Every structure is written in structure tokens, then in C-alpha cells.
């Protein structure tokens, strides 16, 4: 399998969870993978320790990969933090700033740096979320940061088109990553099981192929898209119990 042969990829947040699955998928498809993360990867990818919320550190990661590999064809802006279960009232200014610096500012910086350092014909793929599209309670900072990622994806696609760089996003629903399975008796799992139209929660390996497609030349005319990969949850609820009105008969 050599769909990405000859391409150099920089993946933020690539050390665990969905990011690790993306790195493995890209490496198996022939890409030279570089991981920009605070922690080293357990599997595929050459590692650059990076705090993606710091533009200088993210630029240093670009420059290191560029110096050694000679080019950067793919950027996956995947790093994020997820402060779920925190209401509007309980969201402090410090938390809001931190969430946007990691989840949104880093995507913004990635687009800026892609325009400076990526090869023509390159592809930027941002990781969004279904909560960036539909309203859900108790995660306002995360949801707002991902809604911003969706719009940055569209704006980035327009502005980088002249440089031959495509920009898209993948918006998963709940995914069985260690961040989810590591919570004892995580109530989110049962909650989402009951609402996902396809009736199950995917593994990271079911999401990563969409990233691979967007990174490949087969997606050469796809840009500005935010693709839901969520089992249908963003399309609507699986069940909605209502009693029909008496006048319909």
C-alpha cells in the first residue's frame, strides 16, 4: 500500500488515541511521519517535542521536519484538550484561554505555517468534532473551539488555494480512545450508544482512513470540506419519543 508514498507528514497530537492511529495509517501508506506532541509516540513517527499552543514551538517543528526530510506535504492539526462536563458558569477565563490556545490557535498557526513551508499540492487536515456542529450542554469551551476550527478550515481553504494547498477537516463523534475508555464507568459511552444511528462507537482505526483519503492525491479537488465521521449522530438523533397529535388521523 503506497497511497502516500514520497509524502512527508507532520501530525500534531500524534502520540496517542486518534492521532496515533493517523500516524500508523500514514506510515503504512508510505508517508514519512513526524509527530509534534508533548509526549513521544508509542508507535509510528519521528518525534519533535512541541507545545502546539506556542506558535514559535510549532514553527520550530515545521523547520526541523523540513530541514531533515526536505519537504512537508501533509499537516494534520489534531492536538486538542477536552474539558467535558464543565458548564458555562463553571468555565473560568483561564480554562477558556487554554482550550482555545490548544484547540483553535494551534490550527490557526498551522494554516499560517502551511502557507509558508508546505509544498505545492499539499494537504492540511484539521480534526474537528460533531460538537462543533450541534449544540450540546456542559462542554461550551470545547464545542466553541471546534466550531471555530470548522470555519478556519473553510477560510484556510480559500486563502491557501492559490498556493496549491488543500484544507479540510474531519469531525468525529465519540471515539474509543484511551481518553474515553480510561474513565471508569464513563457515562458518555452509554449515552452515545443510545443516540448514534449506527448503534455503536468506533475505534480510532475507523476514523483514520478518512484522513488518509484527504491526504492522498485522490482527494485532489476536495477542499473546504468538514466531513462528519460519526455514525450519523450529527445528522440527527436515533430516537425521539413523541406522541402523535390527535388531529392527524
Image (tube, rainbow, N blue to C red):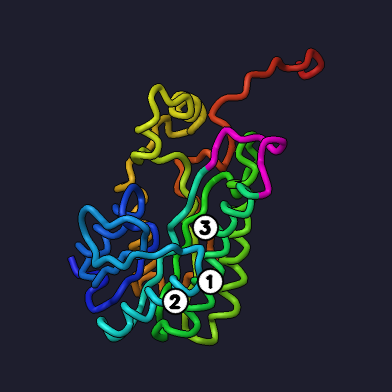
Q: Secondary structure at mark 3?
A: helix
Contact between marks 2 and 1 (CB within 8 A): the answer is yes
Q: Tell me the residue that label 1 is attached to.
A: 109
Q: Which of pointers 3 and 2 lies earlier in the amino acid sequence?
A: 2
**Helix, strand or loop under label 1:** helix
The residue at the point 46 percent across, 64 percent down is: 52
User: Left or right of 224: which side holds 60?
Assistant: left
Residue named by callout 2: 59
SS majority, magenta: loop
Q: How many marks?
A: 3
Name the residue: 39% across, 30% down. 183
Q: Which residue is mark 3?
A: 102
Q: Which of the two labelled residues, at mark 3 and mark 1, occupies the earlier sequence position?
A: 3
Given the current orientation, which residue lies at the most extreme front position? 94
Horizontally, residue 192 falls left or right of residue 210, namely right
Of residues 242 and 135, which is closer to you in this image? 135
Residue 233: give x, y in percent of width and height: 52, 38
The quarter of the picture where the N terminus appears is: bottom left
Residue at (27, 63) in percent of width and height: 26
Crowd tier of the residue under label 2, counting other residues whose Cα lies within 10 Å: few below 14, some 14–19, many 20 or above: some
- Residue 190 higher or lower than 49, as above or below: above
Of residues 55 and 153, the one nearer the viewer is: 55
First-in-chain label (2 vs 1): 2
Amino acid at each position: 500500500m503506497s497511497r502516500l508514498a514520497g509524502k512527508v507528514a507532520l501530525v500534531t497530537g500524534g502520540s496517542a488515541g486518534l492521532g496515533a492511529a493517523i500516524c500508523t495509517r500514514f506510515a503504512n501508506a508510505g508517508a514519512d511521519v513526524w509527530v509534534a506532541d508533548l509526549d513521544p509516540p508509542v508507535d509510528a513517527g519521528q518525534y519533535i517535542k512541541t507545545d502546539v499552543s506556542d506558535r514559535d514551538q510549532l514553527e520550530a517543528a515545521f523547520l526541523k521536519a523540513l530541514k531533515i526530510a526536505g519537504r512537508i506535504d501533509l499537516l494534520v492539526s489534531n492536538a486538542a484538550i477536552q474539558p467535558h462536563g464543565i458548564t458555562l458558569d463553571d468555565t473560568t477565563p483561564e480554562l477558556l484561554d487554554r482550550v482555545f490556545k490548544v484547540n483553535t490557535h494551534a490550527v490557526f498557526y498551522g494554516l499560517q505555517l502551511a502557507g509558508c513551508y508546505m509544498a505545492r499540492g499539499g494537504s492540511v487536515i484539521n480534526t474537528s468534532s460533531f460538537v462543533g456542529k450541534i449544540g450540546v450542554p456542559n462542554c461550551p469551551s470545547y464545542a466553541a473551539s471546534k466550531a471555530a476550527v470548522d470555519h478556519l478550515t473553510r477560510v484556510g481553504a480559500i486563502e491557501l488555494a492559490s498556493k496549491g494547498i488543500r484544507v479540510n477537516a474531519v469531525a468525529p463523534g465519540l471515539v474509543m480512545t484511551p481518553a474515553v475508555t480510561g474513565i471508569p464507568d464513563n457515562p458518555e459511552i452509554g449515552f452515545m450508544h443510545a443516540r448514534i444511528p449506527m448503534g455503536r462507537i468506533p475505534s480510532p482505526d475507523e476514523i483514520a482512513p478518512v484522513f488518509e483519503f484527504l491526504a492522498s492525491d485522490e482527494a485532489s479537488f476536495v477542499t473546504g470540506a468538514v466531513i462528519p465521521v460519526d455514525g450519523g449522530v450529527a445528522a440527527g438523533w436515533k430516537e425521539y419519543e413523541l406522541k402523535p397529535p390527535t388531529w392527524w388521523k
